[in-house]
Image (tube, rainbow, N blue to C red):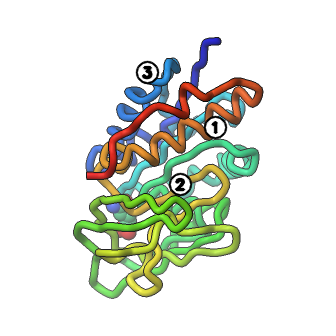
């Protein structure tokens, strides 16, 4: 049995803070180890998002300026992205991308940027402050610990159906108040971790790949893929 997965890099030409594109390199590396072929392409401004074409979507972080452009364009992709998510499509959304999957993001200058509301969170602004630094969290379901680096002014509050990616052990996380970091909704993983998150936390990359394979090949025996050992967080 041969397997293949296609990655859509959402606004990959605009949203790539701190080399978030490295997440795709990690996915490709692990996919190869699993015997899975993978290719990727950027889906950007003025291009439709074909929800039937992609198995995994990567949506990186960015500055307020890029987010203000994307906030408008992404409304044209709202229905297809929402369908993709509801249908169990796999996605990793980071920082600015994470914010725009929710209802709205208030930029540093107070401007309200509309998200697509595919996930039920919203993001307010801090007063002349950013959360910057290393962060350590623990996922409550798996006990896995994830390490990363956060740099955001927005403060995010989770909504219905969302569970945190982890509880904060060190650092700030979603809002500095409720000790949550990131969000998981269906097969979507959201986070404020830059850096790229999948390189430092191979377990998340494996979850994303397994979710995508199980969705595309529901009858396949994926035992060999499941057994792939990935490195622990460092
Ligand atoms: N511009 C957003 C914020 O400051 C997102 C930042 C980012 O993606 N690093 O909160």
Residues 213 and 5: in front is 213
Residue at 50%, 71% (x, y): give it: 105
Give the image location of residue 76, x and y in percent: 66, 48
Residues 157 and 145: in front is 145
Is any atom of residue 64 visible in this view? no
Find disc 1 in the rendering and name its residue: 49
Taking 192 as reference, is 80 left or right? Answer: right
Q: CA distance from mark 1 to mark 2?
A: 19 Å
Q: Residue furthest top?
A: 1
Q: Are marks 3 and 2 in contact (CB under 8 Å)?
A: no
The secondary element bearing badge 3 is classed as: helix
Residue 174, numbered label: none
Residue at 58%, 20% (x, y): give it: 4
Taking 87 as reference, is 126 left or right? Answer: left
Instruction: Mark 1 or mark 2: name the one nearer the start of the chain.
Output: 1
The CB of the residue at mark 2 lies under 8 Å from ligand 1: no
Find disc 3 in the rendering and name its residue: 32
Taking the image in four quarters, ligand 1 sits in the one at: bottom left
Q: Are marks 1 and 2 in contact (CB under 8 Å)?
A: no
The secondary element bearing badge 2 is classed as: strand
Residue at 50%, 58% (x, y): give it: 190
Q: CA distance from mark 3 to mark 2?
A: 22 Å
Taking 122 as reference, is 179 left or right? Answer: left
Q: CA distance from mark 3 to mark 1?
A: 26 Å
Residue 189, numbered label: 2
Instruction: Mark 3 or mark 2: name the one nearer the start of the chain.
Output: 3
Is any atom of residue 156 visible in this view? yes
Residues 123 and 5: in front is 5
Q: Are marks 3 and 1 in contact (CB under 8 Å)?
A: no
Residue at 64%, 54% (x, y): give it: 75
Instruction: Mark 3 or mark 1: name the one nearer the start of the chain.
Output: 3
């Amino acid at each position: 049995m041969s397997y293949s997965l296609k990655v859509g890099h959402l606004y990959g030409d605009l949203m790539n803070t701190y080399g978030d594109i490295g997440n795709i390199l990690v996915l490709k590396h692990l996919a190869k180890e699993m015997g899975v072929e993978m290719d990727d392409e950027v889906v950007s401004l003025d291009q439709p998002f074909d929800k039937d074409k992609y198995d995994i979507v990567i949506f990186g972080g960015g500055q307020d300026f890029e987010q203000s452009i994307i906030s408008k364009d992404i409304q044209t992709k709202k229905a297809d992205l929402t369908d993709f998510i509801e249908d169990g499509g796999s996605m990793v959304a980071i920082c600015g991308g994470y914010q725009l999957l929710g209802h709205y993001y208030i930029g540093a200058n107070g401007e309200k940027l509309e998200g697509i509301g595919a996930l039920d969170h919203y993001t307010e602004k801090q007063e002349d402050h950013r959360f910057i630094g290393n962060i350590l969290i623990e996922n409550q379901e798996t006990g896995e610990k994830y390490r990363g680096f956060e740099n955001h002014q927005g403060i995010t509050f989770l909504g219905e159906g969302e569970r945190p990616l982890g509880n904060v052990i060190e650092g700030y996380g979603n809002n500095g108040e409720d000790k949550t970091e990131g969000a998981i909704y269906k097969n979507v993983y959201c986070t404020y971790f830059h850096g790229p998150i999948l390189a430092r936390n191979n377990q998340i990359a494996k979850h994303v790949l397994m979710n995508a394979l199980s969705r595309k090949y529901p009858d396949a025996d994926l035992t060999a893929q499941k057994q792939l050992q990935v490195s622990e967080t460092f």
